Image (cartoon, rainbow, N blue to C red):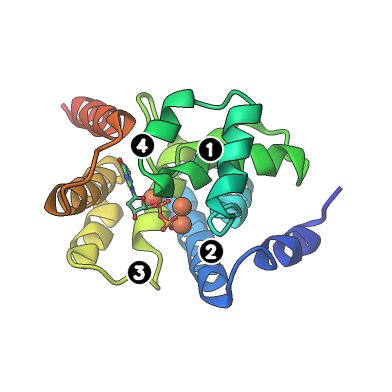
Amino acid sequence: EYSREELIKAVSEQMPAQRWQHTVGVMGSSIKLAERYGADVQQAELAAILHDVAKYWPVKRMEAVIKDNNLSKDLLFYDKPLWHAEVGAYVAEHDYGVTDTEVLDAIRYHTSGRIGMTLLDKVVCLADYIEPGRDYPGVDRIRSLAEISLEQGLIAGIDSTINLLISRGQIIYPLTVFARNDLIKQME
Ligand code: DGI
Ligand code: FE
Ligand code: FE
Ligand code: FE
């Protein structure tokens, strides 16, 4: 099995340097959010290390994993940038020996979110939006909200993604909308 250091080395070799820098940022932000909101810091860091492990896999290779292992079939109908999350969870389990299903779910849902997001899901998904290397319109507002509320930060992050998809005329993955609605319900 992989030690923390071995895992970091192996995963970093799966991606270009700038994507690894993003991952290091997500590790730091996940740890901070976990400490602030009471999630397990070790689970948060492990999920962060692996969350984008499949990001640079060839589309054909991701497609094969989805088809051969009966991962969410309708994923194939939606945008390819969504695929690396589900494939990443599969890879974390089968190639890196992660057995913690909470960590695997946090990886699986880090892009879309889901209904009933766990504390760990929220931490990793929000960390992905606000890590220090991120620079997109509105990121500073999401960073500020993240200090007040995990849910408010996430809703703002998901809103920015949905707005981006709409501005480009792209399809929205229904789970993203369900995740947003559920987070708003949780705020009431
Ligand atoms: O992998 P990262 O770049 O770190 O971030 P991510 O895993 O949140 O992926 C974001 C990309 O996914 C971004 O380019 C938008 C794209 N995407 C495409 N369709 C959807 C989508 N993201 C969400 N949440 N929902 C979609 O329907
Ligand atoms: Fe990602
Ligand atoms: Fe994300
Ligand atoms: Fe990421």
Q: Can you see residue 17?
A: yes
Q: Is residue 124 left or right of residue 169?
A: right
Mark nearer the N terminus (4 vs 1):
4
Amino acid type assigned to the residue bearing label 4 in the image? Tyr
Label 1 sits on a secondary structure element that is: helix
- In space, the residues marked 1 and 3 are separated at their CA atoms by 22 Å
Mark nearer the N terminus (1 vs 3):
1
- Which quadrant would residue 82 be assigned to in this image? top left
Amino acid type assigned to the residue bearing label 1 in the image? Glu
Q: Which residue lies under the disc numbered 2?
A: 23
Pointer 4 residue Cβ closer than 8 Å to ligand 1 = yes
Mark 2 surroundings: few (<14), some (14-19) or many (≥20) residues within 10 A = many
Q: Between residues 115 and 62, which one lies in front from this camera angle? A: 62
Label 2 sits on a secondary structure element that is: helix
Amino acid type assigned to the residue bearing label 2 in the image? Thr
- In space, the residues marked 4 and 3 are separated at their CA atoms by 24 Å
Label 3 sits on a secondary structure element that is: loop
Mark nearer the N terminus (3 vs 2):
2
Where residue 175 sits in the image (x, y, percent)?
33, 29
Q: Which residue lies under the disc numbered 4?
A: 78
Which mark is in front, 4 or 3? Answer: 4
- In space, the residues marked 4 and 1 are separated at their CA atoms by 13 Å
Residue at the spot 23% in from the left edge and 58% down from the top edge: 142
Mark 4 surroundings: few (<14), some (14-19) or many (≥20) residues within 10 A = some
